[in-house]
Image (cartoon, grey):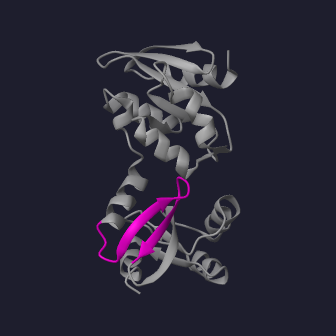
Amino acid sequence: MSSSAQWISDQLNKCNFVTSAEVDGNRLSVVRDSRPTASIGVISLRDVTVADVLPLVEGVQSVDFVLNVPKAGRFMGEAIEQLGLKNVGWGGLGDSIRALRDFDRLGDYQERELTFVMRGLRQHGRVTSLTLLDDHRIVVVRRGLPELVVFVGAMYQPTAETVRDAIDRYGDFDLFAATNPNSDPTAEAIRVAADAGIQMLKWRETLAALHR
């Protein structure tokens, strides 16, 4: 029995819409009060790659959701793409709870902020294609302009430490998109980003910047 899976089971059993969450290795069978029983695959990795998710989603024993335990963990772009093709949801504990609560099919759940940003970028007149590097960075190819790597930051008030952590954890990007509608990056955050050659912009400013 996976200790991570047992811990997740304990957390899900606290939800008032869950009848039971039984552990079988690194998988959970979650019986819900008013929705179909769902299967969750539990992993605990810093970087979730396509090789990590394939054993959970191939064949008749495919799970409905892949849950990565560490809060600082990330799903790489190819893993997200594969899960989308298989109609399997993905995310952390909070994502799994929302998926279990709100959807009959957990594969219909989509991480809200990333989905919002991807939709906005696809509808942008300058954008010709998008590629997910991971769950926070998107390569944006623009018509007649250089491509950009956009980092999606949904926090209310990005700080200098927020920017440093994003750079340390996710690596290179050109633009930090503060997507929270009430986002108010601190002056120090803007300065630290600028020193690293990164634009720190609110969402509307991000869309405008893609034209130039």
Q: Is residue 158 magenta?
A: no
Tell me where residue 73 appears, x and y as whole percent: 63, 45
Quarter residue 16 falls in:
top left
Kindly identify the residue that appears in the image at 66 percent across and 34 percent down.
44
- Report the span colored magenta: 123-142
Residue 114, visible in the rendered structure:
yes
Numbered disc total: 0
Tell me where residue 202 appears, x and y as whole percent: 43, 73
Residue 155, visible in the rendered structure:
no
Q: Residue furthest bottom?
A: 212
207 versus 14 height, above or below: below
Viewer-closest of 171 and 112: 171
5 versus 166 height, above or below: above
Q: Residue furthest front?
A: 59
In the picture, the quarter occupied by the C terminus is bottom left
Kindly identify the residue that appears in the image at 31 percent across and 72 percent down.
124
61 versus 114 height, above or below: above
Tell me where residue 134 appears, x and y as whole percent: 55, 54
Kindly identify the residue that appears in the image at 49 percent across and 18 percent down.
61
